Image: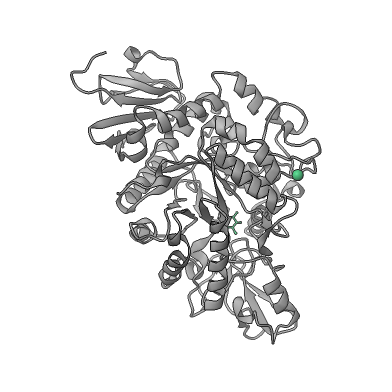
């Protein structure tokens, strides 16, 4: 694969509402990001992806846009964003924004016009409208956030389609005018000097045009809409056109949120002429839920299951192109709470082991805010404490499926998107130094012990380890190998050790990760090596086993070469 500039980036994901509140209204903002640029620079990251900051009623925290060309006042003004882009650039940090083009908010002027003039609006064809049959919605498809995908269009016998919430009507991509409006907007932002986009829910833009019913898969009599409204044949035309009209004209990076794409099609998405620079593969992030969107259908898993998912993903992506690696994001719970099952094992070692295991995979690594200090899930005692619309839906739906209220609360506590959306822990002062007033979302009390200020001072902290990890990938003698090298899994049948090699020309780096709370014997690939990274202070001569949750990154020394 030809080298691309975005392969060597390390991307930090910012959830702006919870990063830093510069004006003390309880809500994080753009100025808050600008004020923390020194911190981001000291971490060593090279690019930030900022979740949506556009004008929005915030039903889905910005993934419901009411004006693509304006910012939400609670985040700041356009001049604040210009300032951020400029100052970040000086510090060697690029800015990527979120692009939400499958749907708008129902408060977008296009949809508002449709509501005002349902029969005559020039925007009728901007959305997906269908008439119901016998008082029933047009199909029995369930939206991602629960309930029918169809919502009655007031004062008509028609319904409008929404893949997600009722406040997020899907745009009609079959309409060329809609597509052209979107391309114009995409180019406007690229002209502004952003480095590219993370592209939201993009596999939903094409719907099966037959609009027929399927067999229900839940007690609500509905069936997941993904079978008919995600990655449908014909989507390739839209995605090629989007790329031709926008991205390809700029040397930008695009990261597709593309769930539901079978591996056989990865080449179309991320190959040489793919639609995107890279895409996220969610298969291993969702290994504890039987289905991608229903948290109450839980399954147990072991390290072998996890390994299999990760390595299959890595091999398939290596065949096709380039991947975007992540442990956490704003839709996932915290990784240490998810991947380390016993609470007593959630510590410095397991957090750094997990971090390194994913960080040195082949692909561009993403770090989600707070992951670098080991922020954890936050257990809520009452449904009232939740903000995330999908948690609230899953709570009620699991009770309809027959689970008790307690069970329902337990499921959503484990998986709620609010787990990772809590305000960032800057220090041990009230509200974790995020704001001086009560933040918009309840926060974890463990900010008194898990916070940036404390970890900055501790040379053996998770934060310090993340910095070293980034340094090793970006600017060590093994950088080229760790960035561009091929990946090859080893010890594939070992029940608790995850291990792989990265190979580039005649260089080789071997990475070992012990997922168990006990020592594990291991026979190393090479007897002659440099230790690039180790979360324990073992001496290299002593390595014949891995300590609990040890991470070890070893660079092979050339044969016959001695220090
Ligand atoms: C994506 C976003 C998620 C949002 C959804 C609808 O999955 O990551 O946060 O709710 O799209 O826009
Ligand atoms: Ca604020």
Q: At x 57% / y 62%, what residue is drawn?
A: 188
Point out the image quarter for the C terminus.
Answer: top left
Observer able to see residue 413: no
Determine whether, in the image, residue 28 is placed left or right of residue 300: right
Position of residue 310 measured from the top left corner of the image (x, y, whole percent): 39, 43
Residue depicted at 65% across the width and 82% down the height: 122
The quarter of the picture showing ligand 1: bottom right
Which residue is at the front of the view, 305 or 62? Answer: 62
* Residue at image point 25% right, 19% down: 527
Residue 191, image quadrant: bottom right
Q: Is residue 385 something one can see in this rendering? A: yes
Q: Nearer the viewer, residue 166 or 485?
A: 485
Q: How is the image coloured?
A: one colour
Report the residue at 28% width, 36% height from top: 503
> In this rendering, would 315 be left or right of 351?
left
Out of 254 and 529, give the one closest to the viewer.
254
The percent coordinates of residue 154 (x first, y second) are 74, 79
Instruction: Please state the total of marks drawn on the protein image.
Output: 0
Does residue 22 sit above or below 101 in this rendering?
Answer: above
Looking at the rendering, which quadrant does residue 114 occupy? bottom right
Identify whether 193 is placed above or below 105.
above
Could you tell me residue 37's position as x and y percent? 61, 36
* Location of residue 537 with respect to 505 vertically, above or below: above
């Amino acid at each position: 694969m030809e080298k691309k500039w975005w392969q060597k980036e390390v991307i930090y994901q910012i959830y702006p509402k919870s990063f830093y509140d510069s004006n003390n209204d309880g809500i994080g903002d753009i100025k808050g990001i600008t004020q923390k640029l020194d911190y981001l620079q000291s971490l060593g990251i090279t690019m930030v992806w900022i979740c949506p900051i556009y004008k929005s009623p915030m039903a889905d925290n910005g993934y419901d846009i009411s004006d693509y060309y304006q910012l939400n006042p609670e985040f700041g003004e356009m001049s604040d964003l210009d300032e951020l882009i400029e100052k970040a650039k000086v510090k060697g940090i690029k800015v990527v924004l979120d692009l939400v083009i499958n749907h708008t908010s129902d408060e977008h002027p296009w949809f508002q016009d449709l509501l005002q003039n349902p029969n005559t609006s020039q925007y009728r064809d901007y959305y997906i409208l269908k008439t119901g049959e016998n008082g029933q919605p047009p199909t029995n498809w369930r939206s991602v956030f629960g309930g029918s995908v169809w919502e009655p269009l007031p004062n008509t016998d028609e319904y409008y389609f929404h893949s997600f919430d009722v406040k997020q009507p899907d745009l009609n991509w079959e309409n060329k005018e809609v597509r052209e409006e979107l391309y114009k907007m995409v180019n406007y932002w690229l002209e502004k000097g952003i480095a590219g986009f993370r592209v939201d829910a993009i596999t939903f833009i094409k719907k099966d045009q037959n609009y027929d019913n399927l067999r229900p898969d839940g007690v609500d009599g509905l069936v997941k809409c993904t079978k008919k409204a995600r990655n449908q044949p014909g989507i390739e035309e839209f995605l090629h056109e989007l790329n031709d009209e926008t991205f390809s004209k700029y040397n930008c990076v695009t990261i597709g949120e593309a769930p539901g794409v079978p591996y056989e099609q990865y080449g179309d998405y991320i190959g040489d002429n793919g639609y995107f620079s890279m895409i996220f593969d969610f298969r291993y992030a969702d290994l504890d839920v039987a289905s991608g969107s229903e948290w109450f259908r839980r399954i147990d898993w072991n390290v072998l299951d996890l390994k299999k998912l990760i390595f299959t993903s890595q091999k398939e992506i290596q065949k096709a192109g380039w991947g975007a690696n992540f442990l956490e994001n704003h839709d996932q719970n915290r990784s240490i709470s998810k991947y380390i099952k016993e609470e007593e094992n959630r510590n410095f070692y397991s957090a750094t082991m997990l971090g390194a295991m994913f960080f040195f995979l082949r692909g561009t690594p993403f770090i989600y805010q707070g992951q670098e200090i080991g922020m954890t899930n936050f257990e809520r005692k009452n449904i009232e404490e939740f903000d995330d619309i999908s948690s609230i839906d899953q709570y009620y739906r699991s009770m309809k499926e027959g689970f008790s209220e307690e069970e329902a609360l337990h499921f959503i506590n484990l998986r709620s998107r609010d787990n990772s959306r809590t305000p960032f822990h800057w220090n041990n002062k009230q509200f974790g130094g995020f704001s001086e007033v009560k933040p918009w979302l309840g926060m974890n009390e463990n900010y008194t012990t898990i916070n940036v200020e404390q970890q900055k001072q501790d040379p053996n902290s998770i934060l310090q380890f993340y910095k070293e990890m980034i340094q090793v990938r970006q600017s060590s003698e093994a950088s080229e190998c760790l960035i561009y090298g091929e990946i090859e899994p080893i010890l594939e049948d070992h029940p608790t050790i995850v291990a792989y090699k990265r190979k580039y020309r005649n260089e080789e780096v071997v990475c070992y990760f012990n997922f168990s709370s006990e020592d594990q014997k291991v026979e190393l690939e090479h007897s002659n090596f440099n230790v690039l990274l180790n979360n324990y202070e073992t001496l290299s001569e002593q390595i014949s086993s891995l300590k609990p949750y040890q991470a070890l990154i070893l660079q092979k020394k050339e044969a016959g070469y001695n220090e």
